[in-house]
Amino acid sequence: MKKILSIILGVCTLALSKEPLVKISEILIDCQYLKEYKDILQTESKQSVKLENGVLMLYAMQHENNPCQFSIIEAYKDQQSYENHITSPHFQLYKQSILHMIRDLKFIPMKALNPQMALEKNIDE
């Protein structure tokens, strides 16, 4: 949990007048689609971070005690960046590709406690 909070705070390394938008998506998928969902999720999250300047992070995690449960920490530069993301062609493809796989979906809005904070360490250190 400490690592997750560090990541949430770390992505908000912005000298912005606008407040970053941060949320956690909780997704439960039908287990028969587990491999397919993971492949689609990894592709879409990589594309979003690479192609969209306003997408600061999409950090997908699979629950250890339930491999069909996923949590995704999402951080966007601002509300407009989030809106641009959800209308992007790659996100729309992701959404349409997984609709039949989803058993439950929740969005948990979060507030960055220190939007200027940056991660101090590289994961490879």
Image: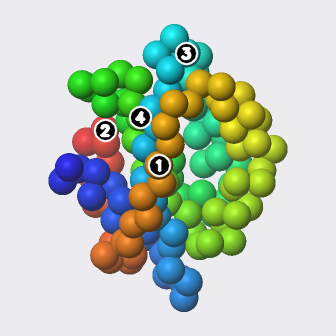
Secondary structure state at the residue bearing disc 1: strand
The relative height of residue 37 versus residue 57 in the rendered view (above or below) is above
Is residue 42 among what the camera can see? no
Please name the amino acid that badge 4 sits on. Phe
Work out how far the residue at label 4 is from the one at label 1, CA to CA, in angstroms.
11 Å
Q: Earlier in the sequence, mark 1 or mark 2?
A: 1
Instruction: Name the front one of labels 4 and 1.
Output: 1
Tag shown at residue 70? 4
Q: Earlier in the sequence, mark 2 or mark 4?
A: 4
Kindly identify the residue that appears in the image at 55 percent across and 15 percent down: 33
Left or right of 13, for residue 84: right
Q: Tell me whether circle 2 and circle 4 mark residues in contact (CB < 8 Å).
A: no
The relative height of residue 43 versus residue 53 in the rendered view (above or below) is above
Please name the amino acid that badge 2 sits on. Asp
Tag shown at residue 106? 1
Kindly identify the residue that appears in the image at 51 percent across and 30 percent down: 103
Q: Position of residue 53 (x, y in %)?
A: 66, 60
Secondary structure state at the residue bearing disc 4: strand
Left or right of 71, for residue 63: left
Is residue 52 among what the camera can see? yes
Work out how far the residue at label 3 is from the one at label 4, CA to CA, in angstroms.
13 Å
Work out how far the residue at label 2 is from the one at label 4, CA to CA, in angstroms.
24 Å
Please name the amino acid that badge 1 sits on. Lys
Crowdedness of circle 3 by 10 Å Cα count: few (<14), some, many (20+)?
A: some
Secondary structure state at the residue bearing disc 3: helix
Asked where in the image residue 81 lies, by quadrant, the reply is bottom right
Q: Earlier in the sequence, mark 3 or mark 1?
A: 3
Which residue is disc 3 drawn over?
33
The relative height of residue 82 versus residue 33 in the rendered view (above or below) is below
Q: Nearer the viewer, residue 64 or 3?
A: 64
Kindly identify the residue that appears in the image at 31 percent across and 38 percent down: 124
Which residue is disc 2 drawn over?
124
